[in-house]
Amino acid sequence: MSEGITELLNLSLDILTLLASILIFYFLIKKLNLYKKRSTFFNLLSNKTFKSRSIYEINKLPLIRIIFAIILLQESYQVYAYLIPSEIFGQQGLVLLVSFICSILLITGLLQQYVLLFLTFFMWHIGDSVLRTSTLGHDITAMLAIFLFLTHSGRIFSLDGLLIRYKPNLSKFLLYFSSGYNQTNLAISKFLALFSYSCLCYYSIIMHINDDAWLYGYAAPQLLSSTYLSQFPEFFQNLFINSEFSVVISKISMWVMMFWYPMILPFVIFGGIFKRFIVIWGFLFFCVSAFVLQLGYLAYYEFLFWIAIFWTISGISNDEKIMVAYDDRCNLCDKTIQVITFCDIFGRIELKPASENVTYLNGWNISLEEAMEDLYGIQEEKNKITYGYEFYFLLSKKIILFWPLAPIFFLGKLFNIGPSIYKFIAKRRRELFGECTLIRKKYINKTIVREDHVPSFNLSVMLSILILGSMFVLNVSLNKDQNNDGHISRLAHLYGISAIDVFNKTDLGMSEIWFTLEDEQGNIIPLFSESGERLEMHNSARVYFGHTLYMKRRFLEKESCMANTFEDWINYFIRIDLNLKNANSGQYLYVFKQFKQPNASNELLIDNIFQVQDRTLTCQKEINFMF
């Protein structure tokens, strides 16, 4: 308890220090009128490095916010699913309840700014400490949360936005310091997020620059073949055994990663092919992290982080608008257009009511009668006309909220079911749905454009992140404060900038030792398989990061039995298993088996030879557990 109070006091002191520095920067910026000035660097960021292809790009932020909140909700639920009753009604359950509430508030966009600050400065520090779920993923979420905070994403498609619409005076109270779209602020917010991520990556490369596993590249095949860290260890083991070339390719990917880490920020600023390399390699890296490796929710947060910074074209850019001609006297057509315009959050279509645009349509050889029969999509830049069922298929590819429907429209076209249904309804639409007696106003997505400067508060946060991040990197470069316990490191960590050292000798060695727990029927509880692969219990970050990962790190190169050292934790896993089975009270017998299998030889991997080592049973023990 005393350690928890001390941790809370230290965190409170760090937050107060951070706020004090931001306030000092804020008053200096106001005093010097810096918020009214546009520097050459700001112009570079907004007009080149992070140039928007659409004034509606800001509308992607609420989508990111909602997906972000859903992932947080799913992550919290996975932890909750493997809690025992005493934890559900204890501190852990309380923290998860708060996490659930925060996720729902983010989804609805209610009190978003306060929720983001609470998550960043409390939940991913004290909350993670209570749950034992501190991960690199939550450092990335902190960066993403600060980005969403600075860009005021909660003003759009949210309950906050509705409150401000009817009560404008609530804007400042809800911590929105800007009243609309701001290209410069968006660009600077992207830069700060990428700067924070780059600091984290810079620390990583400093840690690995003298690591033989990285320098010789054999960390890659060991990682991909690891039963603890890879989702397909047997596949990669067989691949590397039978193909030295595949070992070479995996090594090359590791060397490219070592180059990618320090070049993220400078290459993005350089732009062109350099920026494309960073973006594409990062996307591929996240794909491997999500679908090949087992890194919890880290990859999904990184995907969102990458989308927030670099997604500016597909589905967003309105350089090529679709002119939509429609029968403005038909109820069905009117309702269809209402739905289309509401979902067109990036302003990719422009309406052309047939009765008001006869001359325009004639210029495209479309008669009024034809326009009254079908919906027409005109792409002026491509000199292309689409109508009928093909028009709906086009919309499913061009409007992002319709993307989930694209496969359905494709199948409908492939089997000719869709066009047949469309023709049947189109010919009878007036009889089925009637005619419009009053033309209703269409929903048009609008973004308020204001003077293009950065709010003073945002500039203050920018200075704080740049200074703390730079000092963090300087400490790393000078080989100081690398244990993340120093005051500068703790302050930087509030922004998600932290000391990471992953896929090192310790991480790679964690697949060498594991254990299984068998019940009286010989069933292995879903923690580890006999070959050391992680099972369903590891969906919980509390089980994974808070328990088994710690146990494995403690027992590297040791010959003793985990069941003796971690007796309480072994009993904890048994209790989870019985709780999941809704078992009755009583005594249960479990058999603990501990295995060891060394990784493929480093020396042989240097010569591109992969060889699987023998597995041995190092400890076995019967456990009588009273439930």
Image (cartoon, rainbow, N blue to C red):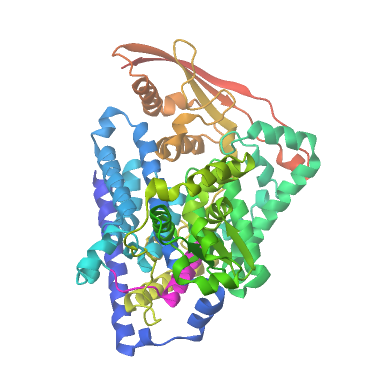
Q: Within the image, what quadrant is residue 447 found in?
A: bottom left
Magenta stretch contains residue 191: yes
Residue 617 visible in this rendered orientation of the protein: yes
Q: Within the image, what quadrant is residue 161 found in?
A: bottom left
Residue 404 shown left or right of residue 363 in the figure: left
Q: Within the image, what quadrant is residue 380 found in?
A: bottom right
Q: Quadrant of the N terminus?
A: top left
Q: How many marks?
A: 0
Q: Residue at x 33, y 16 (%)?
A: 583
Q: Quadrant of the C terminus?
A: top left
Q: Which residues are magenta?
A: 176-197
Q: Residue at x 59, y 25 (%)?
A: 531
Magenta region, main secondary structure: helix
Q: Note whether 16 is above or below 623 in the view shown.
A: below
Q: Note whether 54 is above or below 490 in the view shown.
A: below
Along the line of sight, the residue nearer the viewer: 592 or 440: 440
Question: Where residue 285 sits: x, y (%)?
Answer: 61, 52
Magenta stretch contains residue 322: no
Question: Where residue 469 sits: x, y (%)?
Answer: 45, 68
Residue 200 visible in this rendered orientation of the protein: no
Q: Note whether 549 is above or below 33 in the view shown.
A: above
Along the line of sight, the residue nearer the viewer: 436 or 142: 436
Q: Residue at x 61, y 63 (%)?
A: 385
Question: Where residue 614 sits: x, y (%)?
Answer: 68, 25
Along the line of sight, the residue nearer the viewer: 471 or 282: 282
Q: Note whether 460 is above or below 489 in the view shown.
A: below
